[in-house]
Image: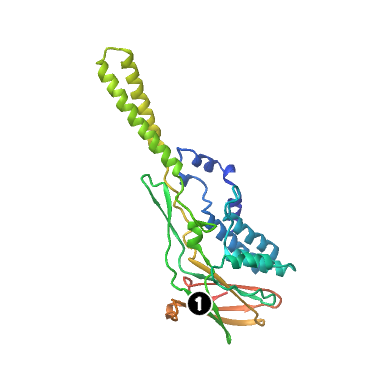
Amino acid sequence: MDDALLTIQNVYGKDEEARKSRGYFNRESRKTFLGEPYERSMAYLYRGILYWRDGQYDNARACFRSAEFEDSDTVEKKYAGDWVLADYLEGLANIELGGDGSEAMKRAQANAKGISLPPFNKEANILFFIEFGKGPVKYATGQYGEQLRFRTTGSSGAAAELKVNALTFPVAPTDNVGYQATTRGGRVMDHVLGNKAQFKSATSTAGDVALITGGVLAAGSQGSHSAADEVGLGLILAGLASKIVSSATTPEADTRMWDNLPNSLSIAMLKLPPGRHTATVQFKSGSSPGTAELTKTVHFTVEPGRDKVVLVSDQSSSPQEQ
């Protein structure tokens, strides 16, 4: 994960293959894979969770802030990152470090879309990170395959119920990864690489026009070596060059992807005594209880004076040892 984040932080301008891919004659898939903003945000979220597990709340907070940064427009300032968990966990990290998490909570609640987020619990020593369904799939459309699109799938669970010992907690998804893939600050994003496609189309059209015009002029001069004949041959050559340039342009969208991301995310926090515990997560479809396949069991141990992070997915094996 650290290697992946170092790659992300190596901005496009420092990467030779990335500079080539911004030109008109190199495929997007040649550049080092950095992912779309939602993929980079998820990398920071996961790393922040791992820092949390190790008790490094300052590094965790930095990762949660970076998750929002990757989803923001830092140039024109037209939109800000709108991940719920990134802001919520930043606020919780602030409290763990002796600070105030109210501003981060305010941002998180504003983006929670009707979900009431639980108040911060400084005494909690268990953080459940719960994932629903399969994440978005990239595909290309358009005349030249230049339009990057996303196919999102419904989650196998619309909610979940967490049971530990005699405690039961309802869990609702707070962040939708598919939504984050297709929006920036709530705005639906159109396809990318339109400039390359326009360039390919324009050079191809220009080549056609030059070839046709040159052919007409050359034919009209009937090989008399006149000025029109020379102009016609020149246009034919220019047309051929333009067609070659067009054929060398590669506007195909880069459809490489992080293919095991979830569809939705949520968390739950509670306090448990040190020792061995068993948790079950019952994923639900709508208001009905989930089937047996959607019940996940996790065994874990709480150590004195240390937070425990437990990750549960409706795609994971069961039972788990964490």
Q: Quadrant of residue 231?
A: top left
Expressed as whole percent of the image width and height from the top left, the position of residue 234 reads 36, 20
Compared to residue 196, the image places residue 48 above or below, namely below
Q: Residue furthest bottom?
A: 166
Expressed as whole percent of the image width and height from the top left, the position of residue 102 reads 68, 68
Local SS, label 1? strand
What is the quadrant of the C terminus in the image?
Answer: bottom right
Give the residue displayed 53% in from the left and 51% down from the top.
34
Left or right: residue 110 versus residue 189 is right
Circle 1 packing at 10 Å, graded few (<14), some (14-19), many (20+), is many
Expressed as whole percent of the image width and height from the top left, the position of residue 16 reads 55, 41
The one of 69 and 110 positioned closer to us in this rendering = 110
Compared to residue 105, the image places residue 167 above or below, namely below
The one of 65 and 304 positioned closer to us in this rendering = 65
Q: Residue flagged by tag 1: what amino acid is it?
A: Ala
The one of 19 and 230 positioned closer to us in this rendering = 230
Q: Is residue 218 visible?
A: yes
Give the residue displayed 63% in from the left and 61% down from the top.
64
Q: Quadrant of residue 169?
A: bottom right
